[in-house]
Amino acid sequence: PLPVAPATEARATPSLCRRKHSCCNTTKGSGKRCYWQRTSMQKRWALLLPAGAISLTGYGVFVYGTSALIVPIREQAPSLSPSIVPYVAGLRSVTFAVTNLFFGQLMLRRGSPTQWVASGCFVAALGLVVAAMNVASPQPSDAVLLLSWGVGTGLGSGLLYMSVFQTTLAWFPDRKGLVAGLLGFGQGLGAMTWNAASLSIAAVMEGSTMLLLYGGIIIGCWAFGMLARWPPDAQPKRSSSSAKTGLCMCFVGCAATASRKCKLAYNSRLKSSTRLNV
């Protein structure tokens, strides 16, 4: 009879982890976590703090907080166009979408998240300060308000959001759905709380003072984005053209919705103020 080869035991073959990190030294079937998961992943939940602070303040302040500025700006600067605030809200949302589309790939290739966050905070805060000075000036200009408040805050928030959210999701390759849901919950919670608080603030503050308050919120809360870091040996994926198209359509829809809400809020508050004067 022919000799039978002895049965060879199945050996565990070395492989990289799901993220394909070169620092990993795991084997299939060993049940052990890679070095990246054992060290960095233990502290990753603390990185939800900057993204959570930005979600709570950004969405509420720039979407629902805009409608509260219609009456104060109208009373402080009556020479401005009555519908300037809804146009500013729409321009800000469009600028936010365009910034994400054109600067998203650049953020992955050049610069660090800290640099992009610092740039976004500076541009947004500078835009709100210029807008406040324009509203408080004897001759306010609609064009200056559109450029400073609309384009400036849209560009700054776009740079900040993209860098912080990309780095946050990169830390959770196994729980991206959960993290995205938490960030969405933060946006809804911030919108709900700020919508109620902005009405009380608008009753005691002028339009220029509220703009400076928004700038202080940006510097205070968005500064947490300076904690954003890429994971060690991370390889962020590039977005496809279809994803870019979907993102553009999403934010254009958000811009139209925000402009429509501001317009309805302006009409209702204008009617209420007219009734009070009568």
Image (cartoon, helix red, strand yellow):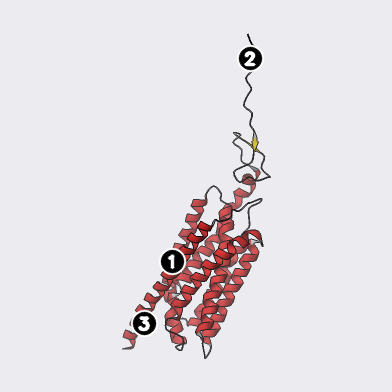
Q: Residue at x 62, y 65 (%)?
A: 116
Q: Quadrant of the C terminus?
A: bottom left
Is mark 3 in CB contact (under 8 Å) with mark 2? Answer: no
**Image location (x, y in percent) of residue 125:** 58, 74
Q: Secondary structure at mark 2?
A: loop
Residue assigned mark 3: 270
Residue assigned mark 2: 4
Q: Secondary structure at mark 1?
A: helix
Q: Nearer the viewer, residue 268 or 238?
A: 238
Vertical placement of residue 173 versus 120, above or below: above
Q: Nearer the viewer, mark 3 or mark 2?
A: 2
Mark 3 packing: few (<14 Cα in 10 Å), some, or many (20+)?
A: some
**Image location (x, y in percent) of residue 29:** 59, 33
Q: Residue at x 56, y 54 (%)?
A: 169
Which amino acid type corresponds to the residue marked 1 in the rendered image? Gly
Q: Nearer the viewer, mark 1 or mark 3?
A: 1
Residue assigned mark 1: 253
Vertical placement of residue 8 versus 60, above or below: above
**Image location (x, y in percent) of residue 271:** 33, 82
